[in-house]
Amino acid sequence: MSEQTETALELRDALRRGEASARELVERSLARIEAGQHLGAFVSVRAELALAEADRADRLIAETAPEDRRTLPPLLGLPTAHKDLVRVRGFVTTHGSAAVPHLEAEADDPVAADVRAAGAICLGKTQVPEFGIAGYSENLIAPPARNPADPALTAGGSSGGTATAIAAGMIPAAIGSDAGGSIRIPSGACGLVGLKPGRGVVPADARSVGEAAIEVDELGAPRMSVSGPMARTVRDAALFYDAITIGSRATGNGGDPMAVTGGRGTTHSHRDEDRPEPALAAVERAHELGGLRIGISVASPFESRMPILVDTAATDALHRAARTLEAAGHALEPADFDYGEAYPDAFTTVWTQALRRIPLEPGAEGRLGELARWFLEGARAAGEERIARAVAELHRFAGETRRQWGAYDAVLTPALAFAPPATGAFWALGPEGDYRLQCEWAPQTSMVNVTGLPAIAVPVSLDERGLPRGVQLIGRAGDELRLLQLAAQLTGE
């Protein structure tokens, strides 16, 4: 694991005090990326672009009076990265696939634009599964993302390369995306805090698909994908969450924070300089939160198709989290949820349809990985009637599950059912066994995406092998800040 102990907040404050420079931070991160190549975190790095951005950040900080620097963009000068499904200006996007062209982006996707507007500096693109379809980060075009706690094991996915980079100290924090657990699975595997916001909460997500389409996808099914922070600490997750929700609005400069003319007395942010960002302020008040009714559950909607076996270390982490939350003044009790039997087929049918919308050139299908080909074949064979039934079932599931969870202020589950499998273990099982192992390992993540509710993965303990173990907390609509507070109570922040 990394020797780096500085948090994103500490680095941000050091930059503002003039005790560190953005160039120094970027150069240190680049050196750590180079030293950690065996971990497979990054698919590509653009050092020259990152260093140029760092120099611009340093100039803006230097041109701003010390007493005004708290009004600078919230992430100004901090190194970060984006997963290789997100277009970032000047960087190539591969989508983790040999079946599509690898093109350099001329413009940022909305979430990358907001992270840039917040002042963070992208160092490179991080490893993902092909088209983000798996809960581990391995593909045919680059080395797999490995777990810094044990490089023989997977880092999870689809934000696996990002999780590796953060856990190994290459970058302090980042924004990932989550359509079925892609923030929470790698966070659970690598011992990070990973927040999946509720549907429509992050402005960039709405801009990506259009406000009118934020609730449902092209099939009319519940839209599942959202963007959210991944970090080593709750405060850092809150910092990055604030940046993509309130701290990165355009300031009349096309989303480029360093296009603002600096100078003594100049204000660079739209925010009230005396008002703390909501998520950070909420975490500071975490000790005040108490009296919640929290249901504990190990149930999974995949139980109707396969045995879900939660191992001893995951159960111990769950019990430890429950005791900690009880000590904080909450009421914990076992919860009895009935998810029915139709979810596995409905979710898989809808999940795989996204592959049909990818434009593949003639002959490109032969360059797909085995899992993607299997998913695509299944998606094509589904038929309109089956797809319609699956869409209707997911809406029914979402409503009924939200009703059941609504009896509690929050629901506590394991983050993952057992320790991360070995790199290559999924592929070795063939596509059907691969997908089954994914469902067994992360049996309680995708259901949250279907409901559209927020959830957070929180590290709780280390098992006897020294591997991180954690829990998932599921909140009510609009409870992102409360989840961050609960996470702070669990981590002692």
Image (tube, rainbow, N blue to C red):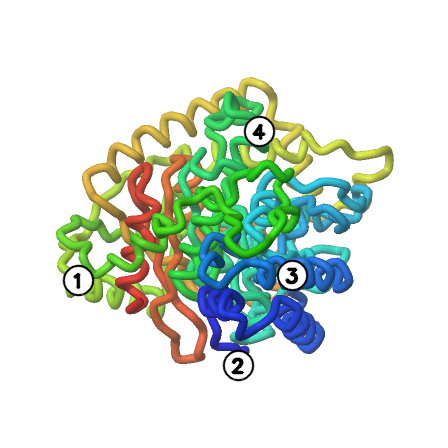
Residue 220 vs residue 493, the one in the foreground: 493
Q: In this view, does 40 lie to the left or right of 455?
A: right
Residue 239 placement (x, y as % from top left): 44, 56
Residue 132 can be seen, yes or no = no
Q: What residue type is labelled 1?
A: Ala
In contact (CB < 8 Å): disc 4 and disc 3: no
Marks 2/4: CA distance? 40 Å
Q: Name the residue under label 1.
A: 328
Marks 1/2: CA distance? 31 Å
Mark positioned earlier in the residue sequence (2 or 3): 2
In contact (CB < 8 Å): disc 1 and disc 2: no
Considering every residue shown, the one lying at the far right of the view is 363
Residue 110 vs residue 407, the one in the foreground: 110
Marks 1/4: CA distance? 40 Å
Residue 139 can be seen, yes or no = yes
Q: Point out the frontmost of discs 2 and 3.
A: 3
Mark positioned earlier in the residue sequence (1 or 3): 3
Q: Which mark is residue 209?
A: 4
Quadrant in which residue 209 is drawn:
top right
Q: Name the residue under label 3.
A: 59
Residue 144 placement (x, y as % from top left): 67, 63
Residue 164 vs residue 369, the one in the foreground: 164
Q: What residue type is labelled 2?
A: Glu
Q: Residue 3 carries which label?
A: 2
Neighbours of disc 3 within 10 Å: few (<14), some (14-19), many (20+): some
